[in-house]
Image (cartoon, helix red, strand yellow):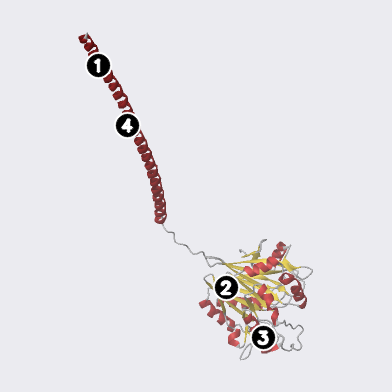
Amino acid sequence: MCRFMKRVLIHILEMSIGILLILLIILGIKYRVEVLNYIKSQTVSVSSEKVTNELKEQEEQKAEDSEVIQESSQIQETVSESEEPVQEEIPQVKETNLLFTGDILLTGYLLSQYDSSGINGILASDIVQEMVDADLTMVNEEFPFSNRGTAMEDKQFTFRIEPERVQVFKDLGIDIVTLANNHILDYGRDALTDTFETLDDAQIQYVGAGNNYDEAKALKEFDINDKKIGILAASRVIPEPGWAAGTSSGVFSTYDSSGLEQEIKNADSSCDFVIVYVHWGIEKNEYPEDYQRQLAQKYIDAGADIVIGAHPHVLQGIEYYNGKPIVYSLGNFVFGSQISKTVFLKVEINEQSNLSLSVVACKTDANYILNKADNQKEIYQYLTEISTNAVIDEDGIVSEKEI
């Protein structure tokens, strides 16, 4: 019995030990699985984080690489641009535009219109604009600026304008005037002196008159677009010999042409272009006198590049002599009277220093305001008919007639 019980107990003990071993094995396996799962999860987490970090680093690297590439590209473009051959700037040679008109007299009626309407009470705005825009504008001033003096006796017409009216000239863009005419001494030498001072104060140049002979004959030079333009003026019409400048003030006379010829020669040696403006001819005569033609040829032979005339108060024709133009009379431009046809002259000097001419036909309206003519072609045809060997086309272009 005891032996039997002992065996049973041993058997139970063996079974218990076996069951315990089995449990231990199961627990060991479960633990091992959990440990493996934990290790795996940690590995995956670390790997994921690493991958994430690596991806982030790659993205940052890409961004940095992109910036470097962009900067490199910009630097390359800059270098490329800097490597382009530097083109030297070629200075632009500008055409030189000169504008000339005939006689100007500012009458009381015109000045009253100026006071009420400004400069366009005298001339149309498009004419004014052309005068202002020109590189140089020159007119014949047919009066003195003064409040002094006594009118010359036994002279049918005497003119004098208040000095403050020089503002009209400034509004017109006038750069230089000729004073060599038969009205500048209408009120004597005091008025002439006032004229000099008025023009000086207005910074407007003048030629053809002076305080003595040397001043009256003096050349006025203008440096325009790298070209030296020289201008001289003289009169072949004066009321009496005493008007000629000498030891006292007066005008530069060209009754004897030798003095002007010598001044032209002197100017020709120092100037690129020499312009001579002369007061001559017979009033109201549309054709030049023989002496005008003779004088003009002498002036050109002496070195003048163009001769321009005034005094007849009407247009006279144009002639070419040895390829140089002579414009015998530009007629009245502003005169306080009806002007049925007149022109202003445009002289263009191109890049090759060639001189070309054109005219713009004008006429006054009922209020004596000068406008560009509505019948310009007719006026150009008329000017061609009274010219010696010049042709003016329908656009006002002046050329030498082909023979």
Q: Distance between the residues labelled 3 and 2?
A: 32 Å
Mark sitting earlier along the chain (3/2) = 3
Instruction: Say few, some or many: other residues with alpha carbon within 10 Å of mark 4 (under 14 / 14 to 19 / 20 or more).
Output: few
Q: Name the residue under label 1.
A: 13
Q: How many marks?
A: 4
| Residue 77 picture location, percent across and down | 41, 52
Give me the disc on residue 39. 4
User: Which amino acid does the dot numbered 3 rest on?
Assistant: Asp
Extreme residue in the left direction? 3
User: Which of the numbered marks, if any, corresponds to residue 305?
Assistant: 2
Comparing 151 with 147, the one in front is 147
Which circle's residue, 4 or 1, is located before the other in the chain?
1
Mark yes or no: residue 80 visible: yes
Discs 3/2, front: 3
Label 4 and label 1: CA atoms lie apart by 38 Å
> Which of labels 4 and 2 is toward the front?
4
Measured in 3D between alpha carbons, the distance from the residue under mark 2 to the one under mark 1, in whole angstroms, is: 147 Å
Question: Which one is in front, 395 or 298?
Answer: 395
Q: Residue at x 39, y 51 (%)?
A: 76
Lateral position of residue 63 relative to residue 263, left or right: left
Mark 3 element type: helix
Does the rendering let one see residue 387?
no
Marks 4 and 1 in Cβ contact (< 8 Å): no
Sequence-wise first label, 4 or 2: 4
Q: Residue 194 carries which label?
A: 3
Estimate the x, y position of residue 141 in percent, counting from the top left. Answer: 68, 78
